[in-house]
Amino acid sequence: MTRPTKLPPRFSEERHARILKQLQEKGRVEVLGLARMLGVSEHTIRRDLLDLQAQGALHKTHGGAVSLDTARLSFAERSGVLAEAKRAIGRVGAALIQPGQTVIIDAGSTSLSLAQALTVRPITVITNSLDVAALFDKDPGVQLVLTGGTWQAASRALWGPAARDMLMHCRADWAVPGACSVDLAMGVTVTDEADAATKRAMITAAARTMVLADHSKQHNVSPFGVARWPEVHTLVSDRPWPEVEALGVRVLLADD
């Protein structure tokens, strides 16, 4: 008996569901691979990806797409996801820093956007990011301090006991720790325990904490805790979050 041939998905909803399943499993997809898997043209897949991006389900890239679950992506891939929103968030965050203040800037694509928008002088910048440090290494108006620690290539960050020990001796006006996820019940969380410990040390060293998080990080939880909302002074995002504001956190909106 001849088995019936499995037909390719005819309807966009079915293709979309299978594309999103691949993204959930792998974090990224390619147009050519999806076209072969689903038995449709590359043009059809590109149209599907545009539709899903418009729905806020993924971020389209050259030749494919990446998940908005950015914790699973490389630093370069994370930097490209919602890049305009991150730049707008960075500008709003940078505007809160005043001349003469000290700010601890974590590694991360949105934190880097804040550093790029930081124009006030003089300031002191403490960072565990070589990318952030490179922005200020020749700037006479910036006292630049590196935390030291073990280099994590995937995150482009310095972590570990040396970084935490150094931060114990710092006092700053602002800490800007990165966030993989932000959730109403669980607060700020990340995917790595050592990273979380370094971020907690930043928060302990600062008078106020500013969290920068675009909407793709909202309502998600990662395994390791960084801060509960009572520890956060300001959240800068591209979408309102009145429930967090009700907890006493100042929520600022960035318009990209």
Image (cartoon, rainbow, N blue to C red):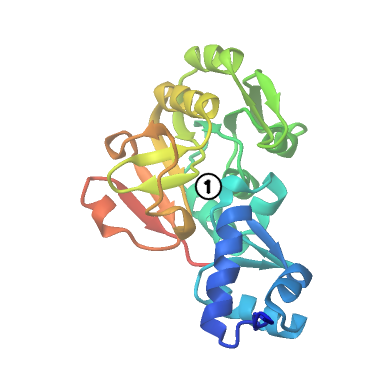
Give the percent coordinates (x, y) of residue 236: 43, 52
Residue 96 image offset from top left, x and y in percent? 45, 46
Q: Is residue 182 left or right of residue 29?
A: left
Q: Would residue 71 appear left or right of 173 to someone viewing this image?
A: right
Q: Is residue 63 visible?
A: no
Around disc 1, counting alpha carbons within 10 Å, would you say few (fewer than 14), some (14 to 19), or many (20 or more)?
some
Q: Is residue 184 among the parts visible in the rendering?
A: yes
Q: Quadrant of the N terminus?
A: bottom right
- Please name the residue shown 69% across and 35% down the image: 156
Badge 1 is on which residue?
94
Instruction: Residue 217 in the image: state x and y as whole percent.
Output: 46, 53
Q: What is the residue that sits farthest to the left in this orientation?
A: 246
252 w.r.t. 187: above or below: below
Choose between 166 and 218: the one closer to the eye: 218
**Quarter of the rendering containing residue 227:** top left
For the point 70% across and 33% down, the residue is 133
Where 151 sits versus 190, above or below?
above
**Residue at left offset 56%, top offset 87%:** 11
Residue 149 x %, y %:
65, 18
In the displayed structure, would residue 17 be above or below residue 12?
A: above
- The answer to whether 55 appears left or right of 159 in the picture is left
Q: Residue furthest bottom?
A: 10
Decide which of 211, 218 is in the foreground and name it: 218
Amino acid found under the numbered disc labelled 1: Ala
Q: Nearer the viewer, residue 94 or 205?
A: 205
Q: How many numbered marks have been drawn onto this rendered protein structure?
A: 1
Closest to the observer: 73 or 243? 73
Dot 1: what SS?
Answer: helix
